[in-house]
Amino acid sequence: MEEGQGGAPFCVTVDGQTKEDNTVTVRQRDSMEQTRVSGDQLLGHLREKLDM
């Protein structure tokens, strides 16, 4: 991480598709990688990414 870069390491987006299939988009701050994750797997997904 560059000096001065901070903030939340992830952004979770709830959108129209969330209502249809109970998924959210998780975007990683540093890589901008986006992953679609089911709502019931969100906490485990974030924990896994934080343990990298």
Image: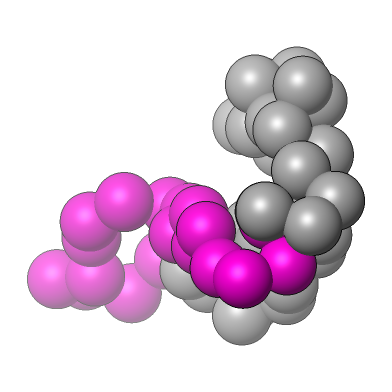
Q: Position of residue 5 (x, y in %)?
A: 24, 70
Q: Main secondary structure of the magenta part?
A: loop
Identify which residue is drawn at 23% across, 60% down.
6
Q: Residue furthest left?
A: 4
Q: Residue at x 68, y 56 (%)?
A: 18
Residue drawn at point x = 33 percent, y = 74 percent: 2
Residue closer to the observer: 22 or 24 = 22
In this rendering, is residue 47 above or below 24? above
Q: Quadrant of the C terminus?
A: top right
30 and 36: which one is in front? 36
Q: Is residue 49 magenta?
A: no
Seen from the viewer's position, the closer of residues 28 and 4 is: 28
- The colouring scheme, among rainbow, by chain, secondary structure or one colour, is one colour
As for residue 3 lying within the magenta part, the answer is: yes
Q: Quadrant of residue 50?
A: top right
Q: Which residues are magenta?
A: 1-18
Quadrant in the rendering for residue 35: bottom right
16 and 8: which is toward the camera: 16
Q: Residue furthest bottom?
A: 32
Position in image of residue 23 (x %, y %) = 76, 49
Q: Is 29 located above or below residue 26 in the figure?
A: below
Q: Quadrant of the N terminus?
A: bottom left
Whether residue 31 sits left or right of residue 10 in the image: it is right
| Residue at figure coordinates x 31%, y 51% from the top left | 8
Q: Position of residue 36 (x, y in %)?
A: 82, 59
Q: Is residue 35 visible?
A: yes
Residue 28 in sight here: no
